[in-house]
Image (tube, coloured by chain):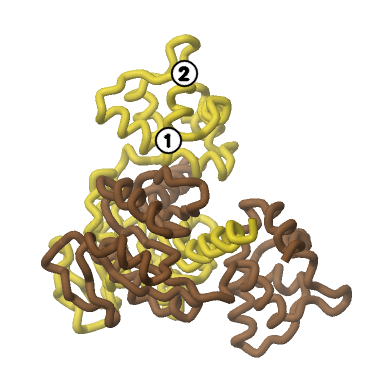
Chain colours: A yellow, B brown
Amino acid sequence: MEETRELSKEISQAVISRLPRYFRYLGELKDEGVTRISSKELSDLMHVTASQIRQDFNQFGGFGQQGYGYNVEFLYDEIGNILGLNKTHHLILVGAGNLGQALVNYMNFKRRGFLFRGIFDKNPALYGKKIRDIEVQPMENMEQFVKENNIDIAVLTIPKTSAVEVAGILSNCGIRGIWNFAHCDLNVPPHIQVENVHLSESLMKLSFLLKNEELE
Amino acid sequence: MEETRELSKEISQAVISRLPRYFRYLGELKDEGVTRISSKELSDLMHVTASQIRQDFNQFGGFGQQGYGYNVEFLYDEIGNILGLNKTHHLILVGAGNLGQALVNYMNFKRRGFLFRGIFDKNPALYGKKIRDIEVQPMENMEQFVKENNIDIAVLTIPKTSAVEVAGILSNCGIRGIWNFAHCDLNVPPHIQVENVHLSESLMKLSFLLKNEELE
């Protein structure tokens, strides 16, 4: 425990961003029955340099053995643990529009231990509607529901006009993380973790890349 | 033209990733009627150091004047131009599920010049269904449609099992960019730009942050 703690503090944002991709490739290798892989093979597969791979894994104390390479299943499990995927997360969805419904319907999240437990919307026309067997409830029920059901993550698929207010309410009722799709920054207390998905900004990056390619 | 070319080549990925956020804040300031802003004020607003802001803008030749600060509208327009938002992009959506529908319905894209022109799906039950006045067509029509309608961006909201094949077809019919929501890497020719949105990986990052917070 102590060791993990020390290590995780030092991990750079860049490495954290790369971990889920390693996890995905190792999961695919595992599914294909591959039991071990060298950093060179993993490098060819992922189009990342072998030295980058070794450096990244060294941040967590290695995992590899000289001449043997990496044990796929062990590495997969270890990275899963580092990512906190060895425990179940309880989620609520706030905003039951198309995007929210898409997320609740995405089965892979469940497989990874992310369980949607409640869905909230301010549109009365949606109350009682079921998405994957979960009924849409009025926003007014959200706070109590979070407190009573040990919810740790709230997924915000609401417009930015209401996201700041909702984040404020959530901050005071025990939520630990917000997965924010609203196109704004949430100023929440530092003990609450926020991961933003700003789709417009992603599309603008693509636009930039197209323009840059044009100029070359 | 030559100067832009030189400049854009040198811009780091990190700066590119920050540009859309500057653009968003400047747009909001503009809407509020703010005409000029110092890097200190922008820094307080965005929670980024003033020196970071100056460094970022210097990559494009500055924009600011000593003692005056930045002209909000000018800076907004310049960053928009750098991001390629001063021209219209023509998009197709491939995969008309909840996520795809959410993207087509998101009006902000249109406001930024990203126009959905065609929607394709392999599910016959969806053929003819209209999303924002655009009819869902069979996948078989995609290639010809892209060629005939000057489409530059394809948005892939399909499972990873078909994404690689679809990306291959698109690569050969004139597409310039792919906005990829499928949870896989696309190996397309280098002249085609890919921007990935891997939602699972974003959620795993949040899980990592929660675990890390727990350990501290």
Q: Nearer the viewer, residue A180 or A4?
A: A180
Marked residue chain, label 1: A
Mark drawn on residue A64: 2
Marked residue chain, label 2: A
Circle nearer the N terminus (2, 1): 1
Residue at image location 85% in from the left, 75% down from the top = B65
Displayed quadrant of residue B17: bottom right
For the residues labelled 2 and 1, the Cα–Cα distance comes to 14 Å
Marks 2 and 1 belong to one chain: yes
Q: Is residue A73 above or below residue B36?
A: above
Q: What element carries label 2?
A: loop
Q: Is residue B90 above or below residue B201?
A: below
Displayed quadrant of residue A23: top left
Displayed quadrant of residue A129: bottom left
Name, please, the residue furthest toward the bottom.
B33
Residue at image location 70% in from the left, 76% down from the top = B75
Quick one: label 1, few (<14), some, or many (20+) residues within 10 Å? some
Q: Which residue was labeled with disc 1?
A: A22
* Residue type pointed to by label 1: Tyr
Whole-percent x, y for residue A105 in the image? 22, 59
Name, please, the residue furthest toward the right.
B66
Residue at image location 36% in from the left, 18% down from the top = A36
Whole-percent x, y for residue A83 in the image? 41, 40
Q: In this view, does B128 lie to the left or right of A37?
A: left
C-beta proximity under 8 Å, tags 2 and 1: no
